[in-house]
Image (cartoon, rainbow, N blue to C red):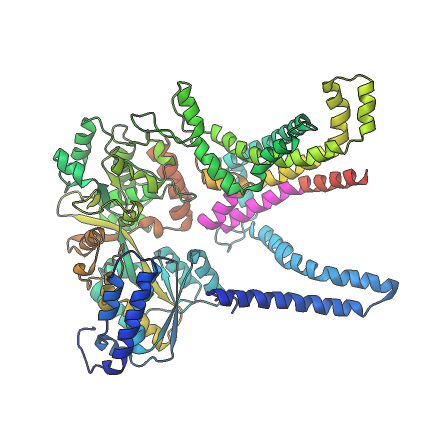
Amino acid sequence: MFGQPTSPRIRAALAGTLSAGLVFGLAACGGGSDDDSAGTDASASAIDCAPYTKFGDLKGKTVTIYTGIVTPEDTPHIESYKPFENCTGATIKYEGDKSFETQILVRARAGNPPDLAIVPQPGLVKQLVTTGKAVAAPQEVSDNVDKFWDKAWKSYTTIDGKFYGAPLGASVKSLVWYSPTEFKDNGYTVPTTLDELKALSDKIAGTGKKPWCAGIASGDATGWPVTDWVEDFMLRTAGPEKYDEWVSHKIPFNGPEATAALDAVGGYLKNDAYVNGGLGDIKSIATTTFQDAGLQIIDGNCSLHRQASFYAANFDKDTKVAADGDVFAFYLPGPDANTKPVLGAGEFVVAFADRPEVKAFQTYLSSDVWANTKAKLSSGWVTANKGLDPNNLTNPIDKLAGTILLDPKATFRFDGSDQMPAAVGSDAFWKQSTAWITGQDTATTLNNIEKAWPK
Amino acid sequence: MFNTASTTPEKILQMLSALLLFAAVMGIILFIAGRFGGKKGDRVVAYLYLLPVLLLLAVGLVYPGLRTIYQSFFDAAGDAFIGFDNYGTIFTDADQLTVLRNTVFWVVLTPFVATAIGLVYAILVDKSRFESFAKTLIFLPMSISFVAASVIWKFMYEYRPDQGTVKQIGLINQVIVWLGGKPIQLLIESPLNTFLLIVVMIWIQAGFAMTILSAAIKAIPDDIIEAARLDGVNAWSMFRKITLPSVQPTVVVVLTTIGIGTLKVFDIVRTMTGGNFETSVVANEFYRQTFNADNQGLGAALATLLFLLVIPIVWYNIRSLRQSEAR
């Protein structure tokens, strides 16, 4: 919808944008951001105001946006709003807060919400809608989402038939980290089916090396990496439809599907021959932080580590994260080479006001124009927006994640525990998974989680 | 303007206006108080001074306290009245019973062991050549936060496998390896892990006990000690018959103070195990149920239980404090 360049109103804004863009571009570099000159290029070249004319003149208007995204990830966000601000004259007030997830509820309930909030879980979107303060998304946003996103995404923020927010960023969780060098030296190939993954694990185990390393410790959220494993295997052993029913509790949590999925995970995580490379026995998974676990690949103590795309940030600066580097990731394969379920997560933009400038900015954020602007500015960021040109993604892991998300064969599903009620999604599922790792059997584990599901 | 300060000048401005507000309120109270005089006036002035404190206590303590108790009779969402069901859960659910068991371990062990160590240490270093240095050593843990102490001890208990080039990074497991043993996953084995967490609390609180008790020992009149010496008592009798009876009220205050702190222990458990591996205690479970599991009712019930458990100790603590002051 931003395709037709109508009468451009760029002349006046041009000079201002150019200088502002340069200044901000320089500021971004001075601010210690390590993605070299990306900032300067994007801002300086984003002077074509044609796509923004439809928003009209918003001079003097202010839109507040409240998020959990803080330094240094906030810089590319703020930068990506500049073209909109410069072309429409609106001011975007960005507020990042580490305790966003609890504060947004407090603010909404107290009647003091921001205009827009970037919400990282569909469950939280639902809670915000229950406060009665959230405003349904305007038609333009809805149209954009229909056009640019897989339809699964729209369902995550559709509550009682009303659509509340467009997705923003996304992350891919179905990834296995490995060492390309090790694979090359030993003649291993990246598996394309689950059977091949098992065969590869056996092959590595045959050499006397523990192939997998895992860690699930994460403070009071200990256990969450297991939930990702289970969700990934649920998608693969039971299929996306059953997965949806399981997440929404249409089928019981402890049914045969989940039992099969958890046992399949157990085939890896509770297999003495497979884990826990460099870290100990199976139980050591429970006390190893998720940040530490994958680093064993670099030390040569293990070969495979299943973790989301954001794990790239965990390797130190000297480690080259690329297909020809020290460490990289491959897509956790599906049951066969043509079935590609993708487990992921993402954020959604929820509005609490419906003033024209808020609607306009919301529409901008759901557009392909914003997605491409943002992609050029940041590293470690992807979106499932199909309008994104993968060539705009700068680093290799983002490119990989982008390719997986935009693959027409991919079936995307949002992290299930983020959608389940808190009593399960952020308590029983974590706690019982941890107990499962330290010895509890599959049936007891699933029964206990089922029992915790609010009636 | 009260929740949107994002830049430093804005925050300073906010702070200044809060200070001004405080000064204004104080000014008004002082002004009104100044208008009263005489014997009867004193009373009014006293109440006036108490007013802001009472007001803040009512808003910040009494109201939330009553509200929590009220909430504990409601279900997870806080909608339906369910009577004593939440309390029933605490005393029947297997997980909650583990929580209660651990809390008992904590409350029984920590105050007594910490006080005993503090008392013995205070007596041993009393009047020795390195007294102040020795006291500083044991008092140091007191000066760091619970979270910092937990992080330190987490490293002490850290586990690495006995495998090829992998090196231990935890002191305790390194010692075990030196002695020819196999490293143990200290924080996973229950109930051992709960005792290992209690050690951290004792490590912190022994310094507190030592300081208070040392002061009490120094306050024992010299003539009593001289008299006992002349009677030829040995060290043990001196401790049993002179020192202990003299510092007994202080010992009780120390015991109860540590007891109250222990009942509320949260930071250590949360930092070291997150309440996993059967190490959760009431305060941690209360937080977990309220904020992670979104079960407001059960969370409130746990908080109320904690409140009920603390009351008798607080009451006893205040009573002994009064007694020891009365002497």
Picture quarter containing residue A399? bottom left
**Residue B2 counted in the magenta span:** no
Q: Is residue A432 left or right of residue A365?
A: right
Q: Give x and y (percent) for residue A217.
A: 38, 40
Report if residue B294 lies within the magenta region: yes
Q: Is residue A263 left or right of residue B70?
A: left
- Note whether A168 is above or below B142 in the view shown: below
Observer-nearest of A418 and B192: B192
Which secondary structure class fits the magenta region best?
helix
Q: Is residue A447 visible?
A: no
Q: Position of residue B121 (x, y in %)?
A: 64, 28
Q: Residue at x 27, y 82 (%)?
A: A12
Magenta part of the protein: which range? B284-312
Q: Quadrant of the N terminus of chain A?
A: bottom left
Residue A319: x and y in percent read 25, 44
- Which residue occupies the foreground of this view, A339 or A255? A339
Q: Residue at x 77, y 23 (%)?
A: B241
